[in-house]
Amino acid sequence: MANAKQPYLDAIRATLNAALCLQNFPSQQVERHNKPEIFFRGDKELILNPIKICRNERERCLIEPSINSLRFSVKIKQMDELDTVLTGKFTRFLMMRAENFVVLQRKPQDDYDISFLITNEHTDVMWKHKVIDFLIQFMEDVDAQVSHYKISINARARAVAREYLLEFVEERD
Amino acid sequence: MPKASGSKGGKSAANSRITSKIEAMAWNGDFTQVAIGVDKSIVVYSAPKADKKAWSKTAEMENAHGLDISGLDWSSVTNKIVSCSHDRNAYVWTLNEDGTWKPTLAILRISRAALCCKWSPDGHKFAVGSGSKTVPVCQFDKEQDWWNSKIINKKRGSSVQHKSSIVSVAWHPNSQFLATACADKKCRVYCARGAHDDEIQLGAMEDFVEDSDPDFGDALFEFVSQGWVHDCEWSPNGKQLAFVSHDSSVSVVNFSESSGAGDAQPLVTTIPYKGLPFTTCLFSTENQLIVAGYDFFPLRVDKDGDDWTYGKPVDEMKAKVNKKANSAMAKFQNRDNLGQDTKVEALLTKHQAAIRCLAINGSKLFSAGSDGRLQFWNL
C-alpha cells in the first residue's frame, strides 16, 4: 500500500522541502504586526504560486507557500459515503485539538479535508526535515486509520446483524 | 558561558548554540567582539583572554527595542553600533568609558518595520531598509543630538521605485552609493551621497550612468531576478555587485564589463543552484563569494575568467558514525524513550536551521542562523 503511494508522497516531500524556506517577515500592511502572509494575503508579491499535487481525482493536496508561512491542505481518499462520514469525524476530532498539534489549522480549506499552517517560527524552532516527516507520516497514517475504522464498523455491523437475525431462524431438528 | 566552537577538531555543534535564533550579528573592527540581537536585546560578547577558552558576555542592552531586533552593524571607523528593529526604530550606541553603551535616537520616519541597517564604510552615515518600501539614510545632527534622515523614496516621475520591503542594503566602498535588495524581486543601486560629500566618484560604473553628478536618491541601476532578492554585497574594490535571491541563484554584476547588448548595461552573470535558496552572501576576495542559506552550510563560489562556479562547501559535513545504533539494547531504549526504533538523525551540517548572517575576517568566516548557533569556520 505504501509502495503504491510512494511517488505521490515523494513528490509532496520534495515540494515541501523547497516551499518551507520561510523567513521572519513583519507585516507590510499593519505596523508592528507579524502575521502569516498566506493567511492574511496582504501583498501579492509575498505569495508564491500554489501547487496542487494529485494522485487521482480523490486524493490530492494543495501547497500554498509565501514568504513567512505555508499552508498544506489534504484531500483524503473517500470512496463511498461511509468513508466520507468517517473522515469527517476523524478530521473534526483532530481539528478540535489543533493547539496540541501546533501546525494544524482549525478549519480546512474549501474542497479539502484538513489543512496545516506552518510559519517561520515553526521552522526555526523545529527541525524542518522532521516537520516534513510528520506531514508525510500523517498522510500515510490517516488512510490506514480510515480503512481500519471502516473494517471494524463493517465487522461490528455484521456481528450485530447476525445475532439479531438468529432470533428469527427456526431451529430445524 | 556559551562556547563558540571551531569547525576543525572543535567542540560539538551543541556548544555553539547561544540563543533561540540569530537574525542580526555585527563584529567590531578588529573582530574581538561580536554583538548579537537576542529577541529585543543586544548582547555583546568578547573574545576570550589568553588563558580562558570561552567567549564572555561583556555588555547587554536589555530591551533595547520594543520588538525583535532585525539588524545590527558595528562601524570599524567610529566604533558605534547601529541597531534597528521591527518596532520602526533605530538607535546608535556609543561606548562609554565604563563599558556600557549609550543609545542615541535616529529619526527614521518609516511607517513599518525596519528590516536591516548598515554603516557606510566611512562611518558618517547609515542606511536602513524598511517595510514601508523606503530607505532612510541617516546622518548625525549635532545641534539636536540625534540622527536625522533623508529618505530614498519614490521620486515623482521615476520609474524605478521600491515596490515592496527592502530586506538588505549594501554600501559601495566609497560610501556614496547604496545597493538595495527588495522583496519585489529586484536589486537596485541608488546614489546616497552625504551632505558633506564633495565629488561623486562613479568609478567603474561611469560607463553605464548617464548623469555624472547624480543627486541623493537618484536610481542608477535596477537588476531583475526571478525571486525575492535576499541579500546584496559589493566586492572589496567596488567593481562587482553580487545578490542572491529566492529562485536559488546567485547573480554577479560586473561593472568593468559590458553586457554587449545595445544600450550600455553592465554584465550580469546569473548562476543557478541545484539546492535551496541562499539568504546571505559576501565577497571573501575579489574572485570568491561565500553564500549561505536554507541548505544550512556556507558555500564558496569561485570566479574563473568570466564565469562563476560553485566550489567546495565550507562545512565538512562528516557523518557521525554511531556504532551502538543497531544494537538490540539501543532499539528498545529508543522505543521506550521516543516511540520509534531509531533515534532521530541530526543533520550532517553544523547549522540546524537556515543561516541568516555571515561575516568574514581574512580567512576566518563567521556564520549565524535561525538555530541560534554562531559558527566559526576556517576558509
Image (spheres, coloured by chain):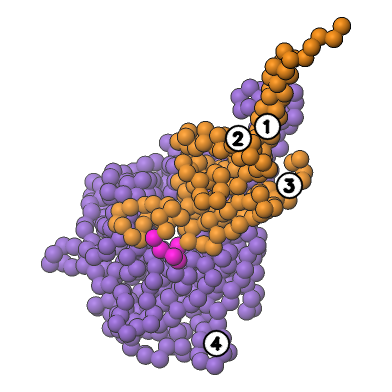
Chain colours: A orange, B purple
Instruction: Identify the residue position indicated by label 4 in the image.
Output: B258
Q: Nearer the viewer, mark 2 or mark 4?
A: 2
Answer left or right for A26 relative to B334. Answer: left
Which secondary structure dominates the residues rendered in magenta?
helix
Residue A98 visible (yes or no): yes
Q: Residue at the right extreme?
A: A173
Q: Are marks 2 and 4 on the same chain?
A: no
Q: Position of residue B96 (x, y in %)?
A: 23, 51
Q: In whole angstroms, how far apart are the C-alphas of marks 2 and 1?
A: 8 Å
Q: Are marks 2 and 4 in contact (CB under 8 Å)?
A: no
Circle 2 marks a residue in which chain? A
Answer left or right for B266 relative to B132. Answer: right
Residue A6 image label:
3
Q: Position of residue B99 (x, y in %)?
A: 27, 47
Residue A124 visible (yes or no): no
Instruction: Identify the residue position indicated by label 2 in the image.
Output: A86
Q: Nearer the viewer, mark 1 or mark 4?
A: 1
Q: In whole angstroms, how far apart are the C-alphas of marks 1 and 3?
A: 23 Å
Q: Which residues are magenta?
A: A42-46
Residue at x-position 26% and y-position 57%: B89
> Looking at the picture, which amino acid does disc 2 mark?
Leu
Residue B221 image label:
none
Q: Nearer the viewer, mark 3 or mark 2?
A: 2
Q: Are marks 1 and 3 in contact (CB under 8 Å)?
A: no
